[in-house]
Image: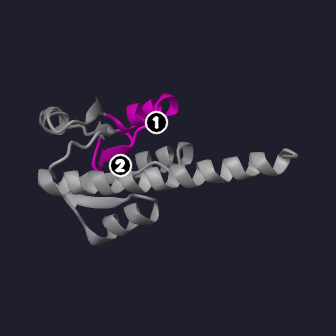
Amino acid sequence: MTEELKAKVLLVDDEVDFLTILAARLESRGLKVTTVTRGEDAVAKVENEVFDLIILDLSMPGIDGLETLKRIKAKQPDAEIIMLTGQASIRTGIEAMKLGAEDFLQKPVNISTLMDKISEAKDKRMLVLQSKNIMEIEKILQTKGW
């Protein structure tokens, strides 16, 4: 990827060392990264901020990744979420996708693969936002007598 990808990312993982290293690697590639170590904190963050993408660990103390995913999707249905896990199972991956995860990647994650997934998720989010804007404009035009 030659051009710098600009996106606002929320990174959620209870492993502080992993969180710090991945955040630094993403920031060095032009991303604006916010980090939290608990699912509850991630849910609180999305109440006040909009992110282009959320990268969410599956296994965390407190509310786990799947429950965090459900709660985030309840607040922001259009949120693009990539799940990360150190212990992937097909059943868990299917459940995450059913709940609205964009993708499901195994740790340690290949940074090039992750950047590709981030780019895809951001493109998808932009299309959804454009579609919503067009629908809003059409609704406004229909209510006006122009």
The image position of residue 100, as x and y in percent, is: 45, 59
Label 1 crowd bin: few (<14), some (14–19), many (20+), radius 10 Å: some
> Is residue 109 inside the magenta stretch?
no
The image position of residue 22, as x and y in percent, is: 15, 39
Report the mark closest to the observer, 2 or 1: 1
Task: Indicate whether 59 appears above or below 35.
Answer: below
The image position of residue 133, as x and y in percent, is: 60, 48
Residue 36 appears in view: no
The residue depicted at 88 percent of the width and 46 percent of the height is 145
Residue range in magenta is: 38-65
Which label was assigned to residue 65?
A: 2
The residue depicted at 35 percent of the width and 44 percent of the height is 54
Task: Indicate whether 111 appears above or below 63.
Answer: below
Task: Indicate whether 46 appears above or below 87.
Answer: above
Q: Mark 1 — residue?
A: 50
User: Viewer-proximal residue, 136 or 117?
Assistant: 136
